[in-house]
Each structure stands twice: as C-alpha cells, then as structure tokens.
C-alpha cells in the first residue's frame, strides 16, 4: 500500500536528484495525487463542514440561552432559600429572647411577691410584738 507520506518522500528524493537547470515550473515533478476521488469531493466536504458549523453555532446559542435561564432560576431559588433561612433564624432568636425575657420577668415578679409577703409578715410581726 502506498501512502501519501511515502509518495512525498519519493517526490523529495526525485527533487534532490534534479539539476538546478531543470527546476523550471515545466520540469518540476509533482507527486501523484494519492486519492483523486477525495480532491473532487472537497467542495461537498467543505460545504458539509460549513453546514455542521452553522448548526453547531445555532445549537450553542440556544444552549447558552438555556444555561442563562437555568442560572437565573438557580439564583432565584437560592434567594428564596436565604430569605426563608433568615426568617426562621429571626423568629428563633426573637422568639427565644422574648421567651427568656418573659420567663425572667415572671421569675422576678414571683420573687418580688415572695419577698413582699415575707416583709409584710415580718412587718406585721414586728409591730404587734
């Protein structure tokens, strides 16, 4: 099997054996065409590749739009998630702080009532005795 590399090597070997006087364009030996059918089909191959490139470019544009839509939807979902997390944290913090303050106030009120009752017992006890 003769490859184009083999033909190119033969071409250069033949060129090195020529004298400088025989290097006019009419005397330059050209390597034989390795596959003449391919050369004749080059325009259709080029057209097919151009069509594929145009289709790929259009598909790429639509994929970019879809990716941008997906990114926007993802950011929207993330925004809603952060809002919910902040709301839950605020409710937790404010709710627990309010419950703790109310519990402390109730405790202090109970202690105050107890001390008031204790002082009144002592007061009445001192006055009568």
Image: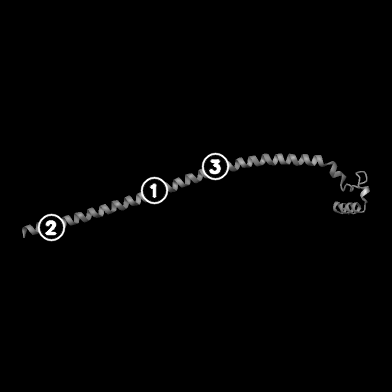
Tell which circle, 1 or 3, labels the residue nearer the N-terminal end.
Answer: 3
Tell which circle, 3 or 2, labels the residue nearer the N-terminal end.
Answer: 3
The residue carrying mark 2 is 121
Residue 107 point in image, percent of width and height:
25, 55
Give the Cα separation between the discs numbered 3 and 2. Answer: 73 Å
The residue depicted at 60 percent of the width and 41 percent of the height is 66
Q: Element under label 3? A: helix
Residue toward you, 120 or 42: 42
The reply to whether the C-beta atoms of the residues labelled 1 and 3 are less than 8 Å apart is: no
Q: Nearer the viewer, mark 1 or mark 2?
A: 1
Residue 107 falls left or right of residue 78: left
Residue 123 point in image, percent of width and height:
11, 57
Give the Cα separation between the discs numbered 1 and 3. Answer: 27 Å
The residue depicted at 7 percent of the width and 57 percent of the height is 127
The residue carrying mark 1 is 90
The residue depicted at 46 percent of the width and 47 percent of the height is 82
Q: Element under label 2? A: helix
The residue carrying mark 3 is 72
């Amino acid at each position: 099997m003769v490859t184009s590399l083999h033909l190119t090597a033969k071409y250069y070997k033949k060129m090195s054996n020529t004298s400088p006087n025989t290097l006019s364009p009419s005397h330059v030996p050209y390597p034989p065409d390795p596959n003449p059918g391919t050369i004749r089909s080059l325009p259709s191959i080029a057209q097919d590749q151009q069509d594929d490139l145009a289709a790929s470019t259009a598909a790429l544009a639509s994929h970019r739009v879809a990716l941008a839509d997906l990114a926007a939807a993802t950011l929207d979902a993330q925004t809603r998630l952060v809002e919910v997390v902040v709301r839950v944290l605020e409710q937790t913090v404010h709710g627990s702080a309010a419950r703790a303050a109310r519990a402390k106030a109730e405790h202090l009120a109970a202690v105050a009532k107890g001390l008031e009752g204790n002082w009144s017992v002592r007061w009445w006890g001192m006055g009568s005795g």
